[in-house]
Amino acid sequence: MEAAMVFVTTGNVSATSRITGIPRSTVTKWIQTKNADWMSVMSEAQDVYETNLRGKLNRALTKLYNHVMANYKDMTPTQAVAAFSSLFDRQRILEGKPTRIVENSTSEEKLKRMAETLSKHAGTPTDKQYVKLPVKKEETKEKVH
């Protein structure tokens, strides 16, 4: 288990060998052959590592949150929003949840919504693709030189 914990933490065969005293070739063989015992211990070590890391990160976020709460009156509104937004995003990432929601739509749907928005502001109808402008009679005559 020690070798697996070291490898999970460092991600390095040489460091695992140096720290545990297990020959590098042995650790490499376990990894390359996907030895069943090694894989089982690695899975357990990974779970322990992630649990410990998640706990440490949550504690760090809590400390940051407490610091922001204690000092938010000294912040500008922009700084306070940035601090809370950043803390919220980091917490969502730790929970494996999205930090923003992105709408899936086709280009055609986006263009239609854009046209509708523009038409509201411009006061033109959305059901017409082209607006026919009146043409003055004199502009249609060919000029003769």
Image (spheres, rainbow, N blue to C red):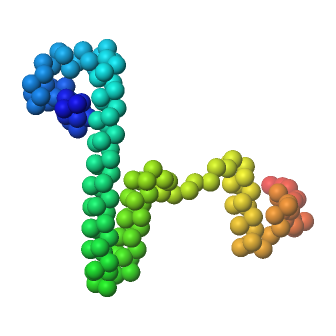
Left or right: residue 130 versus residue 12 is right
Q: Quadrant of the C terminus?
A: bottom right
Q: Quadrant of the N terminus?
A: top left
Q: Residue at x 27, y 74 (%)?
A: 67
Residue 143 in view: no
Which quadrant of the figure has residue 112?
bottom right
Judging depth in this view, the residue of 130 and 97 nearest the camera is 97
Q: Is residue 117 above or below residue 92?
A: below
Q: Is residue 94 above or below residue 41?
A: below
Residue 115 in view: yes
Count of marks, rendered view: 0
Which quadrant of the figure has residue 47?
top left
Please provide percent x and percent y for residue 5: 23, 35
Please provide percent x and percent y for residue 143: 83, 57
Q: Residue at x 12, y 28 (%)?
A: 20
Instruction: Spot the residue most to the bottom.
Output: 73
Judging depth in this view, the residue of 97 and 121 nearest the camera is 97
Judging depth in this view, the residue of 64 and 53 nearest the camera is 53
Q: Residue at x 28, y 80 (%)?
A: 70
Please provide percent x and percent y for residue 44: 32, 34
Q: Is residue 65 above or below residue 38?
A: below
